[in-house]
Image (cartoon, rainbow, N blue to C red):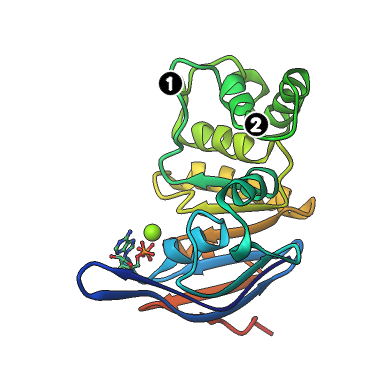
Amino acid sequence: MLELRSATKTYDDGHPVHALRETDLFIGEGDYLTVTGASGSGKSTLLNLLGLLDVPTTGSYHVLGTPVNELGETHRGAVRGQVFGFIFQNFHLLAGRSALENVEMGMLYGPYGRRERRRLARETVERLGLGHRAHADPRMMSGGERQRVAVARAVAGRPRVLFCDEPTGNLDSANTDNVLEALRGLNAEGLTLVVVTHDRAVAAEGRRRIAVTDGSVAEHEPAA
Ligand code: ADP
Ligand code: MG
């Protein structure tokens, strides 16, 4: 469903920074990939290319068979909004809005009307075990609850792929377990997951493990 072919990313800060060296990566429907590597190795660069948040310097990228390099930013934005969901380390929730409102706002740029957004938000908040917190302000929530609200916001509009950059980076182990359980459940329902992490326990969740070293991407052989 996602395919990078000979993709590279080079930043030019006066001198070239090879953030991603030539990479071929095929991601199938329902895959669960975890991506590890040292700070500065290129993990976020890879995630940003896959998530259409950035464009490769060379090479191509296909999403659901469409060569997205050739699309203009409006089209790329539409694919991003309808096919992809994102969660980040720092939650990025709006304070002063309820959990439910945050989840609804995540669907503003998708195809759903107001009533449908409300219905999907309620359903997703319940499914992630946050029904009792639906009207709470994220500021009053634990880190784990906040991250589950962020997961709900990312998946309520039914994306096909969820990209997570250090989703448990700010959580203690009990809250990490809660978020991992939520991700496992979503993957079991068919959602494709790509999760960047420093945490070994989180990395172990993936059925495919990718290591990034100095811009080079390698896949671990699956354990026998
Ligand atoms: P990671 O997520 O593994 O910590 P990144 O993908 O963020 O690593 O960064 C990979 C390399 O690319 C680093 O050397 C980083 O400094 C560089 N880099 C990332 N973003 C930019 C940018 N916008 N401009 C210049 N260099 C960048
Ligand atoms: Mg990063």
Residue 164 placement (x, y as % from top left): 53, 52
Rendered image: mark on residue 170:
none
- The reply to whether discs 2 and 1 touch (Cβ–Cβ < 8 Å) is no
Q: Foreground: 95 or 129?
A: 95
Identify residue for label 1.
95
Q: Is residue 109 above or below residue 176?
A: above
- Which image quadrant: the N terminus? bottom right
Q: CA distance from mark 2 to mark 1?
A: 17 Å
Question: Is tag 2's residue or tag 1's residue first in the polypeptide sequence?
Answer: 1
Q: Residue at x 47, y 23 (%)?
A: 138
Q: Is residue 191 above or below residue 50?
A: above
Which quarter of the figure has residue 30?
bottom right
- Which image quadrant: the C terminus? bottom right
- Identity, as a three-letter code, of the amino acid under mark 2: Met
Callout 2 environment at 10 Å: few (<14), some (14 to 19), or many (20+)?
Answer: many
Asked which secondary structure carries label 1, the reply is loop
Q: Quadrant of ligand 1?
A: bottom left
- Identity, as a three-letter code, of the amino acid under mark 1: Ala
Residue 203 placement (x, y as % from top left): 53, 65
Judge left or right: residue 49 versus residue 107. left
Q: Foreground: 216 or 125?
A: 216
Asked which secondary structure carries label 2, the reply is loop
Identify residue for label 2.
107
**Residue extending farthest left:** 14
Callout 1 environment at 10 Å: few (<14), some (14 to 19), or many (20+)?
Answer: few
Residue 102 placement (x, y as % from top left): 56, 25
Q: Residue at x 57, y 32 (%)?
A: 149
Q: Residue at x 50, y 41 (%)?
A: 175
Residue 198 placement (x, y as % from top left): 41, 62
